[in-house]
């Protein structure tokens, strides 16, 4: 099927490559959802990346403000106009609906346009009160654009958030994209995009988050991530953790391409275990690793690691380790998952530590959504053949709830504990779950000494 | 196939076929009867025939064994430098200056890990391991822990063909535990004081030799400051 890519980062994945040429796409959403930016980027990318000149019709903004806002994203529309590849038409809805005045047709011919953005078609409602003639007008307007060989993005304003009402425009156009700017736990909002309809072509259903970055829109299509083609290595399928004693309990090591939760209260040694896993991986086994931290800054981590004589800075300089710090307050789940996957591929990481998944838990109240996001995270990383340690808060086994749910998605859970034994506080480690590994059960002594973590397998098995 | 001996003439004579590497010896005896001296003879013999000897000092610092060996004209530094003689300090805990030291005497897992680490460094060699005394390490631990420890450890030692000698001081562990533990060893030697209060004598008796015939009679022995343990020449029975 012939399709034209929109050029919007991540979006084309959702429509398997692009939009059918000549189709009308309705972009609807509440104020601040990013509709205009979405439309302008469609036209801008068409000109700059696919040599398809375009037209922007606006009934509301003045060209000046469009130039200014676009320039903030690095898009020089004025230069494109001067190069005769773009026209910005500022007009009223009355003129647009007047069949006698073929303003659009003229402009389209002038630049040989292939793409058009109309911002917004909601204004037709202001000049036409009769529903029937309104529908007829919009229909003939869309048809007119198609006749001119244009693929069109039509912006439509929504006044209420959440409530789903089906406006006639949705029946008239070929594709409907809904943009939202939603509230969510904490002090955060996030932008969500959903393709509600694509006539004559497939799309990936569901809601996808997106962000307006310095260079334009970036859509984070989690469902696309599970298509990564990667074969688990058949030879040497075990990965040595670098923690003395732990590999004995694991009967050799962790399965490759698995995600393992390291769960425990604070002070039980989770982060040290993660650091040791990466450091030993790099130094002893020559495997690259990534540490994604949401709570501690790289310099804090470097300082902590130095206490065990692990020079993370040096490992980073040698390109064996990468420490990525994303402050909890700025973390976006979908973006993190996709970004992490990209980093793993680019860097060639075989080991990954995510410290901690509390960042994920705190963002999503809805257990079903959390479950799904986690599934994508784990599936994506596993397919990349990366063995991931997910540092996790302590989990009461069998208590249900968010954590229990997460532990059902991943391949293994290692519990770290701190208990009183004969008036001494001792640390213990338990392999609670390790799918596909004949592991030793029960609590085993764990110690943190000058060399890091050492596990002492319980005698007698 | 190499056979090992204690280096104590009278005792070795009782073992026609000697001991194979991978055997586990249990020495049980009264305090002061000469168990450590026997351990010293065992190490001396090992060094003489090219074995790597590991001595785990639980009741005294390793220096005591160094001095003991020196008194029998075995200088230890040369052996230690070449890795033929290794001391594990299971006495001083944190204050130890030894290369190998057990930091926590209350934990069998940690002892096991340390022992395994030292043995890993001796792979491919004939090794004698002496723990003097193992009963000290096992005090205050519950019976199931001790038995688990024994089973796991002895299995490993057998697999690695380590000639192991574990010393037990009489009366430290419950008799029931000693009986059960004894089943796991394939050679048992009992040493005790006997005779009258005014004239005590030292006796040794082989309690068990797996798959070999042995005389279970008691033998008088003395400790000479020059020759070490001397088992009475006659094979007569002292009852």
Image (cartoon, helix red, strand yellow):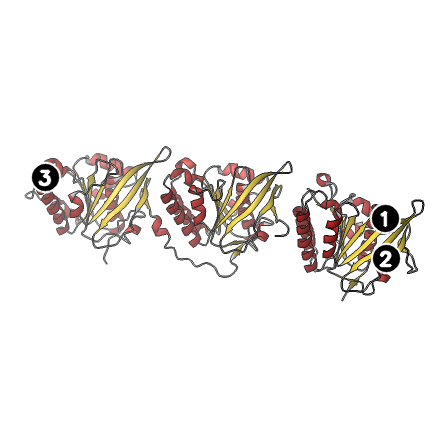
Q: Residue at x 16, y 37 (%)?
A: A59
Which residue, as the protein is rendered here, is positioned at the far bottom?
B1
Residues marked 1 and 2 touching at CB (< 8 Å): no
**Residue of label 2:** B8
On what subunit does the disc labeled 2 rest?
B
In depth, the one of B27 and A345 nearer the eye is B27
Give the structural element (helix, strand or loop) at label 3.
Answer: helix
Which residue, as the protein is rendered here, is positioned at the far right?
B198
Q: Are labels 2 and 3 on one chain?
A: no
Image-quadrant location for residue A209:
top left
* Residue A29 visible from this viewpoint: yes
In depth, the one of A143 and B161 nearer the eye is B161
Image-quadrant location for residue B171:
top right
Between marks 3 and 1, how big is the CA–CA gap?
116 Å
Between marks 1 and 2, how big is the CA–CA gap?
15 Å
**Residue of label 1:** B33
Q: Residues within 10 Å of mark 1 (few under 14, many from 20)?
A: many
Q: Residue at x 77, y 47 (%)?
A: B133
Q: Nearer the viewer, mark 1 or mark 2?
A: 1
On what subunit does the disc labeled 3 rest?
A
Q: Residue at x 30, y 37 (%)?
A: A182
**Residue of label 3:** A95
Q: Position of residue B205 (x, y in %)?
A: 84, 56
Q: Position of residue B12 (x, y in %)?
A: 84, 60
In depth, the one of B101 and B215 nearer the eye is B215
Which residue, as the protein is rendered here, is positioned at the far top?
A187
In depth, the one of A378 and A225 nearer the eye is A378
Give the mark nearer the N terminus: 1 vs 2: 2
């Amino acid at each position: 099927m012939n399709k034209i890519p929109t050029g919007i980062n991540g979006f084309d994945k959702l429509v398997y490559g692009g939009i059918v040429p000549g189709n009308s796409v309705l972009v609807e959403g509440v104020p601040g959802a990013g509709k205009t930016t979405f439309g302008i980027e469609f036209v801008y990318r068409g000109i700059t990346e696919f040599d398809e000149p375009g037209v922007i019709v606006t009934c509301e903004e003045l060209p000046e403000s469009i130039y200014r806002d676009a320039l903030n994203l690095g898009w020089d529309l004025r230069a494109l106009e001067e190069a005769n590849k773009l026209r910005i038409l500022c007009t009223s809805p009355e003129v647009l609906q007047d069949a006698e005045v073929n303003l659009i047709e003229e402009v389209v011919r002038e630049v040989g346009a292939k793409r058009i953005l109309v911002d917004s078609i909601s204004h037709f409602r202001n000049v036409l009160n009769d529903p029937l003639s309104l529908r007829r007008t919009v229909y003939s307007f869309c048809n007119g654009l198609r006749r001119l060989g244009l693929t069109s993005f039509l912006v439509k304003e929504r006044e209420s958030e959440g409530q789903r009402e089906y406006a006639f425009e949705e029946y008239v156009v070929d594709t409907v994209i809904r943009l939202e700017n939603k509230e969510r736990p904490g002090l955060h909002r996030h932008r969500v995009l959903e393709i509600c309809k694509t006539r004559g072509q497939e799309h990936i259903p569901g809601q996808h988050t997106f962000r307006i970055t310095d260079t334009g829109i970036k859509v984070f299509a989690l469902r696309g991530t599970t298509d990564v083609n990667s074969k688990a290595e058949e030879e040497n399928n075990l990965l040595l953790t670098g923690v003395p004693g732990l590999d004995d309990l694991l009967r050799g090591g962790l399965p490759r391409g698995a995600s393992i939760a390291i769960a425990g209260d604070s002070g039980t040694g989770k982060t040290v275990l993660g650091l040791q896993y990466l450091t030993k991986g790099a130094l002893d086994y020559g495997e690259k690793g990534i540490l994604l931290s949401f709570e501690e800054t790289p310099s804090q981590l470097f300082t902590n690691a130095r206490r065990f004589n692990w020079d993370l800075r040096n490992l980073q300089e040698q390109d064996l380790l990468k420490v990525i710090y994303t402050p909890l307050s700025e973390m976006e789940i979908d973006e993190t998952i996709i970004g992490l996957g990209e980093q793993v591929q680019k860097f060639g990481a075989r080991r990954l530590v995510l410290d901690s998944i509390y960042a994920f838990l705190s963002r999503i109240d809805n257990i079903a959504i959390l479950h799904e996001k986690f599934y994508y995270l784990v599936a994506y990383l596993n397919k990349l053949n990366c063995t991931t340690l997910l540092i996790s808060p302590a989990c009461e086994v069998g208590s249900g709830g968010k954590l229990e749910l997460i532990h059902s998605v991943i391949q293994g859970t290692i519990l770290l504990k701190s208990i009183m034994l004969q008036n001494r506080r001792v640390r213990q480690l338990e392999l609670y779950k390790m799918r596909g590994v004949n592991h030793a059960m029960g609590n085993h002594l764990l110690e943190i000494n000058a060399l890091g973590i050492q596990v002492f397998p319980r005698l007698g098995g | 196939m190499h056979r090992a001996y204690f280096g104590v003439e009278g005792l070795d004579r009782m073992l026609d076929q000697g001991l194979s590497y991978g055997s586990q010896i249990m020495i049980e005896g009264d305090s002061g009867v000469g168990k450590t001296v026997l351990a010293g003879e065992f190490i001396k013999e090992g060094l003489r025939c090219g074995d790597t000897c590991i001595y785990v000092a639980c009741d005294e610092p390793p220096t005591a064994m160094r001095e003991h060996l020196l008194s029998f004209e075995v200088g230890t530094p040369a052996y230690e430098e070449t890795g033929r003689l290794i001391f594990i300090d299971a006495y001083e805990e944190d204050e130890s200056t030894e290369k190998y030291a057990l930091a926590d005497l209350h934990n069998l897992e940690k002892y096991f890990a340390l022992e395994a680490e030292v043995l890993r460094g001796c792979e491919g060699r004939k090794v004698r391991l002496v723990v003097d005394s193992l009963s000290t390490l096992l005090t205050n631990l519950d019976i199931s822990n001790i038995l688990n420890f024994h089973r796991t450890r002895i299995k490993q030692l057998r697999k690695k063909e380590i000639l192991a000698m574990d010393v037990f001081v009489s009366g430290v562990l419950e008799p029931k535990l000693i009986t059960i533990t004894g089943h796991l060893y394939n050679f048992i030697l009992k040493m005790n004081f006997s005779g009258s209060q005014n004239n005590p004598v030292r006796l040794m008796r082989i309690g068990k030799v797996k798959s070999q015939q042995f005389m279970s009679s008691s033998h008088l022995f003395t400790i000479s400051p020059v020759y070490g343990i001397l088992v009475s020449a006659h094979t007569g029975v002292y009852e």
